[in-house]
Image (spheres, helix red, strand yellow):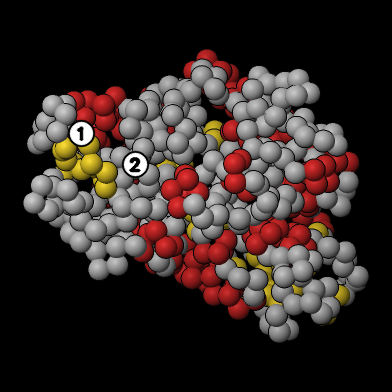
Amino acid sequence: MLYQVYIRSFLDSTGDGVGDLAGVRAGLPYLSKLGVDGIWLSPFYPSPQHDHGYDVADYCAVDPVYGDLEEFDRLVADAHRLGLCVVIDIVPNHTSTAHAWFRTALAGSPGSPERARYHFADGRGEHGELPPNNWRAMFGGPAWSRITEPDGTPGQWYLHMFTPEQPDLNWRDPRVGDDFERIVRFWLDRGVDGFRIDVATGLFRHPDLPDSPDPGADERARDSVNPLAWNQPDVHGVWRRWRAVCEEYTAQDGRERLLVGEVSVPTAADQARYVRPDELHQAFFFDLLSAPWDADAFRRTIDDALRDIAGTGSTVTWVLNNHDQVRSVTRYGDDTGVFGATRARAAALLMLALPGAAYIYQGEELGLPEVVDLPDEALTDPIFRRTGSRRYVRDGCRVPLPWSGHASPFGFTAGTATSQPWLPQPAWFAEHTTDRALMDTTSFWHLYRDALSLRSRLPQLGTGTLRWLESPRDVLTFVRGDGVVCAVNFGEQTVPAPLPGTPLLSSAPCPPGLLPGNTAAWWIDSLTSL
């Protein structure tokens, strides 16, 4: 089980209001105590921060706001001493406009090798004043921007499926693949244990860049929907190449290197093609995150994943939260906001009982809700800057963590009393500080810690099968291995429990023989295996 660290918002060691690598290093004992197996770090590369690091200006360095390579090396060494693996984010779909490759391309001429690294094309219209095709960007607006040529005349257009500051690389140019193999090796040589691959369905576009019959699909969904721009068959060759590199390093020292992809595709069967034995080890299964709070919906989602993804020999990679999504405590709430925390606790216990891998996002273990009332002037998400709409804006799940105290900055920053986090923390964060969670044995933190401890101690909760049991309406019940039973009551009424006695672990108090509404629990036939 890996813990996603959004570095900007984890812990600030310098007092500038922005989290950094030294802050992550200081927080490693906390994560070890929680019981995670490793960490996934958000991008820390030099970047103009138009999309908070997902616009990379140099893939083999550290942005000074986060530290330097020496600090990164210390972080990896400390993590390994604690038995934690380190997975880093890599962004191969696009660079920053500040990257040397793109600056060189701008200085080149149409048709030059420098421009071949990206998607440059002549515009349509009498004077090339119209974009090369009708595609729209995921973060809003046209997917093309026009440049001014070195001689000062209006010139070609370049493709960017996110923002104009994130030009898409052209992976049909073999130099791009060679460069990224060198980048992958650079970080493996520094001791990382793997990579989380941003936009793993990207990289390749339809070679003809034709008009789309639904050009605004990505913009509406804020997701990779346009079939001409995503999920092209050529991308699988890249993952086979990276897998071979990882296997090479594993063969040298026996330590597995992990490739986990951000794979947003229509069905579990589509995702299964990314986790074939010679491609990615894992791919995030977002369908569980997006499923409504409904027993039938959760069962269909789980069945699809276990049938199609586990059938490849890979493990399903479950996730309920990340840095791009509304937090589960808010997402599962009803109109009154009453059930969000209770349901989020139950969903967490369900996820951690499923066969496969699991990732949790920082603050999930504190039961943090989404911060939904950030003022417009505080928002930094490029979606808001490009559309003016707060819908899909991701800042609310990225507010810096509360560690201690009763007022902002809640121990997040080591600065003076006037130092402020890069996003404002609400006063109610005082109810969710790590100090408070550690002292309260009924907190989210203890639920996660206890569940992770049991996962590591009970072989039945490792890899293996899941078998559904007969259940009352609105209840899902399944057995793992040879005796661990998990039941989740999605309804509001208390129902009979599947086993007598007090459960081994539950998301809310469970009277013997009963399972309250919006509650999950685990039972075991015999406690001798503990």
Give residue 377's position: percent from left, percent from top.
Answer: 59, 41
Q: Nearer the viewer, residue 396 or 250?
A: 396
Pointer 1 local density, CA inside 10 Å: few below 14, some 14–19, many at least 20: few
Side of 98 where 293 appears, left or right? right
> Residue at horizontal 74%, vertical 77%?
491
- Of 457 and 217, the residue lying toward us: 217
Q: Residue at label 2? A: 164
Label 1, label 2: how many angstroms apart (C-alpha)? 14 Å
| Disc 1: which residue | 148
Tell me if 302 is positioned left or right of 260 in this view.
right
Of label 1 and label 2, which has the lower sequence position?
A: 1
Q: Residue at x 9, y 36 (%)?
A: 111
Furthest residue in direction bottom, as rendered: 473
Q: Position of residue 310 (x, y in %)?
A: 47, 62
Place of residue 362 in the rendered image (x, y in percent of width and height, measured from the top left): 65, 43
Amino acid type of the residue tagged 1 in the rendering: Thr
Examine the rendering and report whether any part of residue 352 can be seen: no
Q: Which disc number belongs to residue 410? A: none
Residue 262 position in % (x across, y down): 44, 50
Report helix, strand or loop for mark 1: strand
